Amino acid sequence: MDYLPELRRLEHQLDLAHRAVRLIADRETAHRLEAFAHEIGERLCTLKAASREEAIRRRAYELWQNAGRPGGRDLEFWLSAEREFLRGQ
């Protein structure tokens, strides 16, 4: 799954919500918007984690295939893919 469009959409919504909170004089409305921004932030974190896991899964599979599809080494390929991912950030 391509998470990038949804990640960008949520980041944009979060930015708009944070900007709007600063402009709203009514405290109750601002509080509701802050709560909404918090929910968006949580969804964004969840989606980022899923995107990261998917990228690592794909790379681990590619490494496994390139190594000739050996059995019993799944953790090795996962950790290698994870290291690559973290270096690329």
Image (cartoon, rainbow, N blue to C red):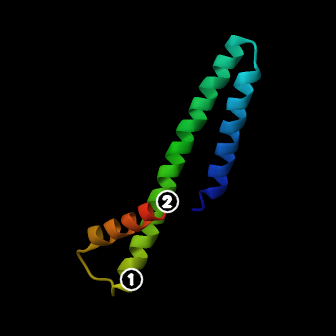
Q: Are marks 1 and 2 in contact (CB under 8 Å)?
A: no
Numbered disc total? 2
Name the disc covering residue 56, or none.
none
**Location of residue 77 (image quadrant):** bottom left
At 43% across and 78% down in the image, what residue appears?
Answer: 62
Which residue occupies the extreme bottom position in the image? Answer: 68
Structural distance between the alpha carbons of marks 1 and 2: 24 Å
Crowd band around label 2 with a 10 angstrom C-alpha radius: few (<14), some (14–19), many (20+): few
Q: Amino acid at mark 2?
A: Gln
Quarter holding the N terminus is: bottom right
Q: Nearer the viewer, residue 30 or 57?
A: 30
Name the secondary structure under disc 1.
Answer: helix
Q: Nearer the viewer, mark 1 or mark 2?
A: 2
**Residue topped by disc 2:** 89
**Earlier-in-chain disc, 1 versus 2:** 1
At 60% across and 36% down in the image, what residue appears?
Answer: 40
Name the secondary structure under disc 2.
Answer: loop
Name the disc covering residue 65, or none.
1
Q: Is residue 67 left or right of residue 89?
A: left
The x and y percentages for residue 64 are: 35, 79
Q: Amino acid at mark 1?
A: Gln
Q: Nearer the viewer, residue 16 or 67?
A: 16
Q: Is residue 89 left or right of residue 22?
A: left
At 76% across and 22% down in the image, what residue appears?
Answer: 23
The x and y percentages for residue 51 are: 51, 57
The x and y percentages for residue 75 are: 27, 67
Crowd band around label 1 with a 10 angstrom C-alpha radius: few (<14), some (14–19), many (20+): few
Q: Is residue 74 left or right of residue 45?
A: left
At 70% across and 24% down in the image, what residue appears?
Answer: 21
The x and y percentages for residue 42 are: 53, 37
